[in-house]
């Protein structure tokens, strides 16, 4: 039977449909083809993904250097998707992200070491129903490559037919392969650097708003070190607040990558606490206890209590809130939530706007507190992926992203894998739907 898309010397390998008798492809055939290339298209549904589109998708995957396996199959391929997915994973024997388009339905599974179950489920939900198939699969791959860990299997870049009779042939092959590897690595690095620049530009807008808000707080306080009644303690508080303000501006001016923003917002929070202490001293009130800022908007200042709250479709959790938001919640009103520009366009709560806001939130709340606060949100899911730490830096308390050790993407693990570690997600499916931000696009 003809190949789904034939590779050439100048195009990425596309998995060919093996020669077989008429009828549906088998799990073994798909798995065998995947070990040679990332994209398999059953000839019976080649109208869904053309040869050119399959080659483009394969190139996108290989340039990302991620272990993503895509198959476009007829609706009759299987009646038991979960079992078939597990069989495909076992027969392919490579840790990674597995994507099946069976008829018009999308199914996504991944080894936990490359992508968390919740993130995998979100990925499937985000692109389910997208048409045409080329747009669906390209969009899915583009988002997944920015968030998953691991690397592509070595078998995709292996080249057969290198003459073994002369060292000249081997030398030429080495140059070709080395040049291709260099080009691929350079493209991947350039893409990542560009994405990080775009993420930092997005963060600058939000951080500038925070710095401006803190500067306005300094002005409203209207403290003069020489005013009557001013004490050395008050002057020390004020100096710490001013230092934090200047430090935050300087740190942001010199920020070179998104994770640098964590120190900026940490400085702002230090300064805001110093102002709260100063304000209490001037009024003769009891000095405030150091608490996290308001979860809904850190510009609201120190929290005064922890209240039970749940994001849309998510599980309840305790979050620190300011006095104003506490009163709103007690009266059945919505809190004043900080919204920012999201990856998908439009303004969204910062915890649903994209992974770039992780470092920003990390400076305010600290790594140990964030996982619980953000559980069930898109930002929380992103922070639990191996790729997040690589692109945005790890934060205290995040752990290993739930990978639990073991194989990374692209490693040959054979059929000896835990099916419970290979799934499409769980829980509330938060983070997507309703036109929310992309799975992490743009960084």
Image: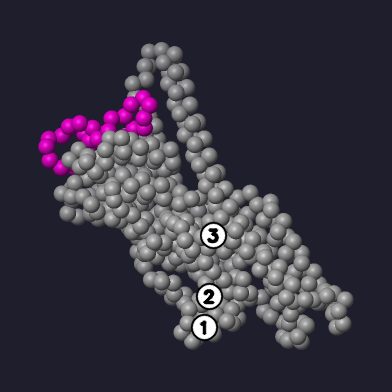
Residue 249, quarter of picture: bottom right
Q: Secondary structure at mark 3?
A: helix
> From which residue to which does the magenta span run?
1-30
Residue 2 rendering spot, x and y as whole percentages? 20, 31
How many C-alpha atoms fall within 10 Å of the one at disc 1: few (<14), some, or many (≥20)?
few
Q: Where is mark 1, residue-wise?
A: 328
Tell me, yes or no, if residue 24 can be seen here. Answer: yes
Residue lying at 48% horizontally and 65% vertically, measured from the top left? 348
Tell me whether circle 1 and circle 2 mark residues in contact (CB < 8 Å): yes
Q: Nearer the viewer, residue 442 or 156?
A: 442
Q: Nearer the viewer, residue 53 or 430?
A: 53
Q: Quadrant of the N terminus?
A: top left
Q: Where is mark 3, residue-wise?
A: 357
- Using the numbered discs, state the Cα–Cα distance from disc 1 to disc 2 in whole angstroms: 9 Å
N-terminal of the pair, mark 3 or mark 2, is 2
Image: 97 above or below 229: above
Instruction: Specify whether 333 is left or right of 419.
Output: right
Residue lying at 73% horizontally and 82% vertically, measured from the top left? 280
Q: Where is mark 2, residue-wise?
A: 336
């Amino acid at each position: 039977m003809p190949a789904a898309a034939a590779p050439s010397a100048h195009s990425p390998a596309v998995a060919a449909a093996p020669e077989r008798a008429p009828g549906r492809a088998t799990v073994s055939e798909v798995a065998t083809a995947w070990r040679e290339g990332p994209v398999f298209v059953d000839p019976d549904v080649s109208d869904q993904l053309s040869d050119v589109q399959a080659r483009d998708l394969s190139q996108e995957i290989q340039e990302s250097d991620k272990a993503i396996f895509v198959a476009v199959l007829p609706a009759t391929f299987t009646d038991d998707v979960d079992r078939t997915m597990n069989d495909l994973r076992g027969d392919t024997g490579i840790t990674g992200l597995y994507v099946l388009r069976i008829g018009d339905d999308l199914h996504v599974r991944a080894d936990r070491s490359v992508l968390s179950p919740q993130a995998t489920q979100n990925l499937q939900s985000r692109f389910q129903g997208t048409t045409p198939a080329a747009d669906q699969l390209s969009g899915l791959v583009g988002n997944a490559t920015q968030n998953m860990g691991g690397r592509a299997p070595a078998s995709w870049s292996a080249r057969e037919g290198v003459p073994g009779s002369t060292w000249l042939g081997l030398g030429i092959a080495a140059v070709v392969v080395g040049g291709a590897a260099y080009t691929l690595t350079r493209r991947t690095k350039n893409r990542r650097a560009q994405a990080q620049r775009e993420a930092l530009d997005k963060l600058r807008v939000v951080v500038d708003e925070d710095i401006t808000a803190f500067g306005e707080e300094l002005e409203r306080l209207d403290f003069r070190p020489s005013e009557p009644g001013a004490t050395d303690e008050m002057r020390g508080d004020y100096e710490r607040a001013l230092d934090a303000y200047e430090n935050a501006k300087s740190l942001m001016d010199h920020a070179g990558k998104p994770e640098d923003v964590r120190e900026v917002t940490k400085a702002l929070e230090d300064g805001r606490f110093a102002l709260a202490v100063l304000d209490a001293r001037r009024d003769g009130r009891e000095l405030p206890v150091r608490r996290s800022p308001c979860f809904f908007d850190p510009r609201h200042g120190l929290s005064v209590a922890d209240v039970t709250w749940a994001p849309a479709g998510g599980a309840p959790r305790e979050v620190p809130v300011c006095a104003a938001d506490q009163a709103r919640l007690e009266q059945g009103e919505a809190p004043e939530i900080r919204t920012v520009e999201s990856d998908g366009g439009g303004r969204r709560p910062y915890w649903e706007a994209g992974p770039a806001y992780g470092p920003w939130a990390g400076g305010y709340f600290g790594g140990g507190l964030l996982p619980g606060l953000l559980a069930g949100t898109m930002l929380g899911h992103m922070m639990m992926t191996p790729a997040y730490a690589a692109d945005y830096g790890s934060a205290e308390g995040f752990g290993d992203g739930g990978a639990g050790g073991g194989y990374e993407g692209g490693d040959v693990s054979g059929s000896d894998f835990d099916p419970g570690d290979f799934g499409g997600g769980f829980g509330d499916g938060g983070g997507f739907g309703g036109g929310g931000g992309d799975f992490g696009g743009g960084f």
